[in-house]
Amino acid sequence: MHASEIESDLTKVLVTEEQIDAKLEELASHIDADYAGKDLLLVGVLKGAVMVMADLSRHLGHNVQMDWMAVSSYGASTKSSGVVQIRKDLDTDISGRHVLIVEDIIDSGLTLSWLLDNFASRGAASVEVCALLRKPDAAKVTIDCKYVGFDIPSDFVVGYGLDFAERYRNLRDVAVLAPHIYTED
Ligand code: XMP
Ligand code: MG
């Protein structure tokens, strides 16, 4: 699905499909180099990171393992509640493993900060983060994110896995959601 098909819901395209692909290829080459000779476990955070995981992992030369976790800190709202709940835990024992968390976006950073503590307590050998998008102006906690795709303004964005009330995930680009879609009057 392309942004032009739902133009009235979006204010602008922020990152195009082509820009995303080029960036993921670049990040993948850094990840390949950094983890040379090591076993790597990619952990995708459901559901938003599905597209990033699919495309990033296929740019890797590494034969990685994948696992998924589902946490929620957002309801149908556009603001983080700061309360993180595990909806689906890992299937993998990460003790002694090199883990790379794959995320769609770092907004307040609260979700990742919680996940990083949680993974550290399970005894991972290393935990790093790869996020396609980051909103530097929205940070409430500082996250040491080793691989970042794009720093973007604090507007609510959708597409490429990111949703508003479960819609727009299959948009190929990342676009800014028009405020009239989510503000009540
Ligand atoms: P925090 O604030 O904890 O948020 O860093 C992390 C999670 O919140 C979701 N999120 C968004 N989802 N458009 C979305 O569709 C956005 O602009 C946005 N900002 C945050 C997302 O699931 C992320 O993993
Ligand atoms: Mg997410």
Image (spheres, rainbow, N blue to C red):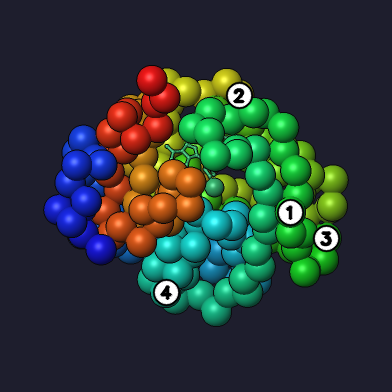
Q: Secondary structure at mark 1?
A: strand
Left or right of 119 on screen, residue 67: left
Residue 137 is at least partly visible in this image = yes
The residue that disc 1 covers is 87
**Residue 175 on image: x %, y %:** 27, 43
Disc 1 C-beta below 8 A from ligand 2: no
Which residue of the protein is positioned furthest toward the bottom in this rendering? Answer: 63
Q: Nearer the viewer, residue 10 or 25?
A: 10
Spatial CA distance of label 3 from label 4 is 25 Å
Tell me the quadrant of the picture where the C terminus can be found. Answer: top left
- Residue 95 got which mark? 3
**Residue 30 on image: x %, y %:** 42, 58
Q: Amino acid at mark 2?
A: Val
CB under 8 Å between callouts 1 and 3? no
- Residue 141 got which mark? 2
Q: Nearer the viewer, mark 3 or mark 4?
A: 4
Q: Residue at x 36, y 61 (%)?
A: 170
Spatial CA distance of label 3 from label 2 is 25 Å
Q: Nearer the viewer, residue 21 or 34?
A: 21
Q: Within 10 angstroms of label 1, few (less than 14), some, or many (20 or more) residues?
A: few
CB under 8 Å between callouts 1 and 4? no
Q: Residue at x 43, y 36 (%)?
A: 134
Q: Secondary structure at mark 4?
A: helix
Q: Amino acid at mark 4?
A: Arg
Q: Earlier in the sequence, mark 2 or mark 4?
A: 4
Left or right of 123 on screen, residue 158: left
The tally of labels here is 4
**Residue 92 on image: x %, y %:** 77, 68
Q: Amino acid at mark 1?
A: Arg
The residue that disc 4 covers is 58
Spatial CA distance of label 1 from label 4 is 26 Å
Q: Secondary structure at mark 3?
A: loop
